[in-house]
Image: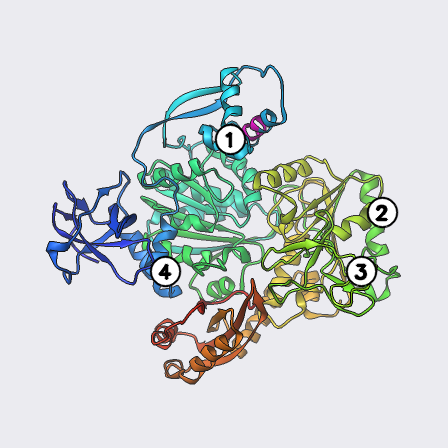
Amino acid sequence: MSGQEFFQAGERVGVLTTQPLDRLLDYRAPEGGCFLGAYVEVPLGPRKVLGVVWGPGAGDFDSAKLRAVIRVLDVAPMRTEMRQFLGKAADYTLTPMPAMLRLATRAPGLSDPPSMRKILRRGDGVPDRMTDARSRVLGVLEDYGGLAFTPRELADMADVTPSVVKGLVKQGTLREEEAPRDTPYPHLDPELPSKQLTEDQAKAAQALAEGVHSGCYGTTLLKGVTGSGKTEVYLEAVAAALRAGRQALVLLPEIALTAEFLTRVEARFGAKPAEWHSGATMTERRRVWKMVGQGAAQLVIGARSSLFLPFRDLGLIIVDEEHDTSYKQEDGVLYSARDMAVLRAAMCSAQVVLASATPSLETWANAEAGKYKRLNLTSRFGASVLPDMRAVDMRSEDLLPSTWISPTLKQAMKLRMERGEQSLLFLNRRGFAPVTICRACGAQVACDHCDARMVEHRFMKRLMCHQCGETKPVPEACPSCEVEGKMAPVGPGIERLAEEAAALFPEARIAVLSSDLFGSARALKQRIEEIAAGEADIILGTQLVAKGHNFPLLTLVGVIDADLGLQGSDLRAAERTFQLMRQVAGRAGRAERPGEALMQTFQPEHPVIRAILSGDEENFWKAEAAERQAAGVPPYGRMAGIILSGPDLAAVFDLGNAMARNDGPLRRIGAQLFGPAPAPIARVRGRHRVRLLVKAPKGVPLQEALARWTAPLRLKGDLRLSIDIDPQSFF
């Protein structure tokens, strides 16, 4: 990094742009000069593009031909620690710097000059008549809890014409105001009274607060059984950061969790924090980005991408449910938000809290090795106790064909219905049926563009490919043999399970929680709030329900297929099954009423099933760690996945074979190369996919070797190569 902090007008500056270029571009500093890290608008050919002043110019371009920076944006310059973080993240993930900068500048209207704008809020007037379009406009305002919108944004979100919005303004139903485009967030007060903590919680909260007050980097695993009050503990760490005048970031794995969490934050600190996720409006996202940079947002609740916000003084990062696979970005820039949180904290002397009832093996191993501190919460908060867990041996259950709810589970559900309590049935499969087969010829309906079977979604009356999103009607005649009336769904999806539950309990109110059944994050949040308020007797859910939701009336969890995750060759299959089952079971009995979890399995003697039922977590982690260590795989070894793709299978394999023949840089560090081989899903969106896997000892410079190995490659035509360091999935 350059030691020069300010560049006078006309001085040569090096600008990193968001465009896919392999170097900094030289420009002349504008009139009035610019600071190192300034966000600027620069000419690139006929276009104006966004960039950041990264240092002095290289000086390898004729200064007489240099073009000047057009203008400096009116936002706080990028701090040194942020530039260092982007650089290290780029080196670790082998990502070009322009792509990293795009992650750090995802704020709509960032280059717009500061100005006033017209915004709309709900007024006191009542429309002379209520139309469907007007109802949608008012519904949007209600869904977003009274937030203000620009006229265009409100029209777009309600899917109405601007004239509908103007008509409501004229009638006083909407109130027009002039407001600054971006305003500071309300002050959060850490001195407001917190909930009464147990002795366990108070000790953990004190330890986290001391870490924050130290002003140094540190990472702590906060491990507590489901319902033990981890949130209340780490909110005290947030309070410590606010008292120290530093900013805090809380990462959540699921947007649907934010509504309940925001309510808890508001109760603790007296105001709502900033939100950063795909469910936030464009206007709100721009405001968050700018206020974070000015220090006018003390706390941000966000998805994984909020790690790249320009915090002025970040002192604490919480990664809630740190084991969750959604923290891994699987397209574009491939990164783990958990790992990047630790890196970001190290860059700015902040504390990291990794909170989970079932931590990832990587985090558990780091805590065992002493790299991370560990705090344990061993009992549930208040009157609630951990659910009683037991297996339902499906080999001895008398089950009718094409049904999946065992008599044992049915009887337990009936008992809950009689008591006015809720039951949850968990099946980690979206749709109605995972396969549609022809009973005449045996052909399965596959996607036209992917090597994947199409899943029937009966609510939509369509077949859908879960790889590319392609849909088509359920065929009357077999596409292969053209025989009519022989197409049959095979296997259960969550929608098929809902049909079975409705037939067994016709009087029950049934709610299905699956991500593909809700048009927006707000709609999903609202449904979850309704269920928590008791507006359902039976809840059916996919993986979505395992993520921290609190249903006070829920006392029974039934896992329909506990064996599902144990299939396949994924090295993390056992770990993920253990985490998912424990998390799902933890939804039961979170209030005063005791809970029970029943796991339907054909393998009750399987070591993972036994570990889940016994609750002997430490022995499970030790056994899993020993297996991984013996195999030399993460976290006791390094891995990288390379995916090659293109429309021509032969060309993709030719590239893979050429890479395998020239693997000298990998062999020099003791790494092994496996492949090329067809990826488990060998075609997606018409592109053939070939996979290579690199396995290396822990501690070797894997990224350097990969960079040297791939540097000579010149990808021709439509060939693509992506490198995934520490892959989480192997599809």
Residue type beneath disc 1: Ala
**What's the mark number on residue 488?**
3
Mark nearer the viewer, 3 or 2:
3
Residue at mark 2 to residue at mark 4: CA–CA distance: 53 Å
Q: Counting residues from the N terminus, which is met first, the one under dot 2 or under dot 4?
A: 4
**What's the mark number on residue 155?**
1
Residue at mark 3 to residue at mark 2: CA–CA distance: 20 Å
Residue type beneath disc 2: Ala
Span of residues in magenta: 137-142
Q: Counting residues from the N terminus, which is met first, the one under dot 3 or under dot 1?
A: 1
Q: Counting residues from the N terminus, which is met first, the one under dot 3 or under dot 4?
A: 4
Asked which secondary structure carries label 1, the reply is helix
Could you tell me residue 41's position as x and y percent? Answer: 26, 45
Front residue of 214 and 331:
331
Tag 4: Cα neighbours inside 10 Å, few (<14), some, or many (≥20)? many
Asked which secondary structure carries label 3, the reply is strand
Could you tell me residue 504's position as x and y percent? Answer: 85, 47
Residue with the mark numbered 4:
89
Say whether marks 3 and 4 touch (CB < 8 Å): no
Asked which secondary structure carries label 2, the reply is helix
Residue type beneath disc 4: Ala
Q: Quadrant of the N terminus?
A: bottom left
Residue 578 location, quadrant = bottom right
Residue with the mark numbered 2:
503
Asked which secondary structure carries label 4, the reply is helix
Front residue of 311 and 152:
152
